[in-house]
Structure formats: structure tokens, C-alpha cells
């Protein structure tokens, strides 16, 4: 009889403990908010200290590369649009290099 009483008591304790664990809820910790400083990026890049001759050489080389890339475009219409854009970019770079902008 004593064994039966101990078994019932053990089951009662286990059931009560399991029930009490099931009833507790864990709350997650509060999130931590870190405010970092914001870096403002200017719209325009600062002027480079290159000479006008270097800028003209770079514009000429960029135009040659762009023309070669345009020739790889499929279709004449796409090539024409690409070459027109490349020429406009070249003209802008040359105007800037010659101080006309």
C-alpha cells in the first residue's frame, strides 16, 4: 500500500510541475535601438586634380571603348542609339575638359 501511495504522490507532483511550467510564459527581451549618424553624400563629385590634356585623353579612350561596345549590340537600331549616346557623352566630357561647361 505504501508503494501505491508513493506512486500516486510522484505522479501528482510531476503533473503539477508540468502544468505550472506550461502556464508560465516567457517574454522576449526588449529590442535595443541604436541610432547611428547619417553620412550625407553630395550630389556632385569634387573636381579631380587632373589636367585638361588628361581629361581629353580619357574622354577619347572612353569613346573608343563605348563604340566597340555599341558594335556588339544586336540590331542596327540598338547600335545607332548606343553610338548616339556614346557621342553625347564624349561631347560632354570634351566640353568639360575644354572649360566650356
Image (tube, helix red, strand yellow):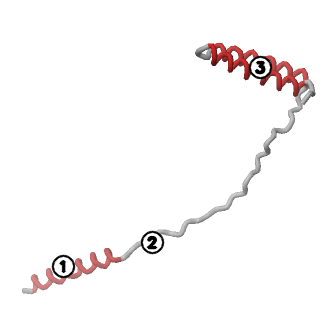
Q: Which residue is mark 1?
A: 11
Numbered disc 3: secondary structure: helix
Q: Position of residue 79 (x, y in %)?
A: 65, 16
Residue visible at 23% across and 77% down in the picture: 14
Q: Is residue 49 left or right of residue 24?
A: right
Q: Quadrant of residue 72?
A: top right
| Mark 3 or mark 1: whose residue is earlier in sequence | 1
Q: Nearer the viewer, residue 31 or 20?
A: 31
Image quarter hosting the C terminus? top right
Whole-Å distance between the Cαs marked 3 and 1?
88 Å
Whole-Å distance between the Cαs marked 2 and 3?
64 Å
- Label 3: few (<14), some (14–19) or many (≥20) C-alpha neighbours in 10 Å: some
Numbered disc 2: secondary structure: loop
- Label 2: few (<14), some (14–19) or many (≥20) C-alpha neighbours in 10 Å: few
Q: Residue furthest front?
A: 77
Q: Position of residue 17 (x, y in %)?
A: 28, 78
Whole-Å distance between the Cαs marked 1 and 2?
29 Å
Q: Is residue 86 left or right of residue 34?
A: right
Q: Which residue is mark 2?
A: 27
| Mark 1 or mark 2: whose residue is earlier in sequence | 1
Residue visible at 69% across and 58% down in the picture: 36
Q: Position of residue 26 (x, y in %)?
A: 42, 72
Image quarter hosting the N terminus? bottom left
Q: Which residue is mark 3?
A: 87
Amino acid at each position: 500500500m505504501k508503494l501505491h501511495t508513493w506512486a500516486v504522490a510522484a505522479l501528482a507532483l510531476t503533473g503539477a510541475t508540468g502544468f505550472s511550467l506550461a502556464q508560465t510564459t516567457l517574454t522576449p527581451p526588449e529590442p535595443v535601438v541604436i541610432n547611428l549618424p547619417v553620412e550625407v553624400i553630395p550630389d556632385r563629385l569634387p573636381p579631380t586634380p587632373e589636367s585638361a590634356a588628361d581629361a581629353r585623353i580619357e574622354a577619347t579612350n572612353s569613346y573608343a571603348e563605348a563604340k566597340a561596345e555599341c558594335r556588339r549590340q544586336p540590331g542596327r537600331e540598338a547600335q545607332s542609339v548606343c553610338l548616339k549616346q556614346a557621342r553625347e557623352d564624349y561631347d560632354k566630357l570634351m566640353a568639360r575638359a575644354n572649360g566650356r561647361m
